[in-house]
Image (cartoon, grey):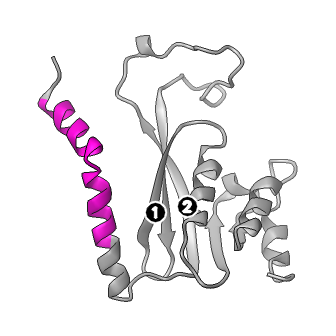
Amino acid sequence: MPTVFSKNRDRLMEGDIAQKFFDQVLEQATAAGLVSDEHFSVDGTLIEAWASQKSFQRKDRTKEPRKGGGQESKLAYCGNAMIENRNGLVVDTELLQAGGTAERDAALPMVDRIESAGRVTAAGDKRYDTRDFVAQLRSLNATPHVAQNEKRPGGMGRWARLVSGCGE
């Protein structure tokens, strides 16, 4: 039998109540001049799903496991937020199934949704330091500011910051 919480959660999600609330708060903050349209940061966090281990079974053997080495498998989502840097307000969110590229996959549509007349900056930690991600940010009229990941071959962090002035 579904719980009261489950029933209400479904109603909230189906009616987009949470999104409407978020949009109203953001609209008020924008009208008050509290939201920058130039400088942003993105980040994500794992949200553990409320499901039993029995429901976590591989459907496709070709997919990569969603876990790090030496860690147990867990059903999880990647909750992502974009923050404008002037006042630290959340201006966009994206929820994806957890995976090795979920943070970068969520950041791109959020950057694409920024309404700005000019070029913007998008900052991220070392998980965003890949050549492909940096190139995609630039194609979205965004200057990347990502931390250098010295452990991953092909990272661009320090290079992305130093060269960002070249035609950007």
Residue closest to the far front? 15
**What is the magenta range?**
4-25
Q: Residue at x 53, y 22 (%)?
A: 73
Q: Identify the element where label 2 is drawn.
A: helix
Marks 2 & 1, CB-CB < 8 Å contact = yes
First-in-chain label (2 vs 1) = 1
Crowd rating for badge 1 (residues with CA inside 10 Å; few <14, some 14–19, many 20+): many
Residue 91 location, quadrant: bottom left
Q: Horizontal placement of 41 versus 158: left or right?
A: left
Residue 142 in the image: x percent, y percent? 69, 72
Question: What percent of the width, then of the height, locates residue 147?
Answer: 71, 63
Q: Which one is nearer the viewer's eye here, 66 or 112?
A: 112
Of 4 and 148, the residue lying toward us:
4
Whether 66 is among the magenta residues is no
At horizontal 21% and vertical 31% (from top left) the residue drawn is 6
Q: Main secondary structure of the magenta part?
A: helix
Within 10 Å of disc 2 (Cα), the crowding (few <14, some 14-19, many 20+) is: some
On the image, numbered disc 2 is attached to which residue?
110
Q: Is residue 93 left or right of residue 166?
A: left
Considering only vertical position in the picture, is 4 above or below 133?
above
State whether residue 70 is above or below residue 143.
above
**Left/right of residue 145 with respect to residue 11 in the rendered view:** right
Kind of residue at disc 2? Met
Q: Nearer the viewer, residue 127 or 92?
A: 92
**Quarter of image, res 29:** bottom left
Query: Residue 92 got which mark?
Result: 1
Q: Find the distance from the CA under tag 2 to the CA under tag 1.
A: 6 Å
Quarter of the figure with the C terminus: bottom right
Q: Which residue is outermost to the left?
A: 4
